Image: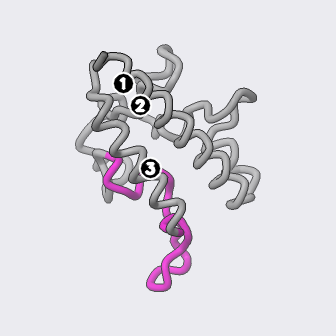
Amino acid sequence: MGFDKKEMIEKLNFEIEMIEKGGYYPSVREPRHNPEFFRDTITCPNVGLEGEKKEFPCSSCFLSQFLPPEMRNSNDDICHKIPLNQIGDTIESLKAEDDPQKLQAIVLGWLKRTVAKLEEEVAAKAQ
């Protein structure tokens, strides 16, 4: 499935802004709820829906393109299984470490690198 790279850049930039503005910290209204990266924003086609209530398979999300091909057809919150760095950290593995600052820093780094790469690809194609 092909995804529009400009749209992907827009959505990933939205995620960067969410992190930089503190959008993934618990809100004052719901201090016990920690927002989930990608899942709790408009980036997710199933935002606000849980488990079996999902309308769209996770494999239909543009984030599936950042997974190894053998993992793309899963419907198990694949956005949390994307390798974020060279050592293979994922949102899932970093959440287990219970270090929110480290998690945010690694996700933010991945987002910025990914946006830069996509922008280069779009610019190269435009030439």
Left or right of 12? Residue 31 is right
Mark 1 or mark 3, earlier in chain: 3
Mark 3 and mark 1 in contact (Cβ < 8 Å)?
no
Residue drawn 47% across the image and 80% down it: 30
* Viewer-side residue, 63 vs 96: 63
Mark 1 and mark 2 in contact (Cβ < 8 Å)?
yes
Which x, y percent locates residue 106? 66, 46
Mark 2 or mark 3, earlier in chain: 3
The colour mode here is: one colour
Say which element carries label 3.
Answer: loop
Say which element carries label 1.
Answer: helix
Circle 1: residue type: Ala
Alpha-carbon distance for marks 1 and 3?
A: 26 Å
- What residue is shown with label 1? 123
* Viewer-side residue, 73 vs 1: 1
* Viewer-side residue, 125 vs 71: 125
Which x, y percent locates residue 115? 46, 37
Say which element carries label 2.
Answer: helix
Residue drawn 50% across the image and 25% down it: 67
Alpha-carbon distance for marks 2 and 1?
A: 6 Å
Q: Is 104 in the magenta? A: no
Mark 3 and mark 2 in contact (Cβ < 8 Å)?
no
Circle 3: residue type: Phe
Relative vertical location of residue 121 with respect to residue 80 in this rendering, above or below: above
- What residue is shown with label 3? 38
| Number of marks present in the image shown | 3
Image: magenta residue range: 22-44
Left or right of 89? Residue 26 is left
- What residue is shown with label 2? 119
Residue 74, visible in the rendered structure: no
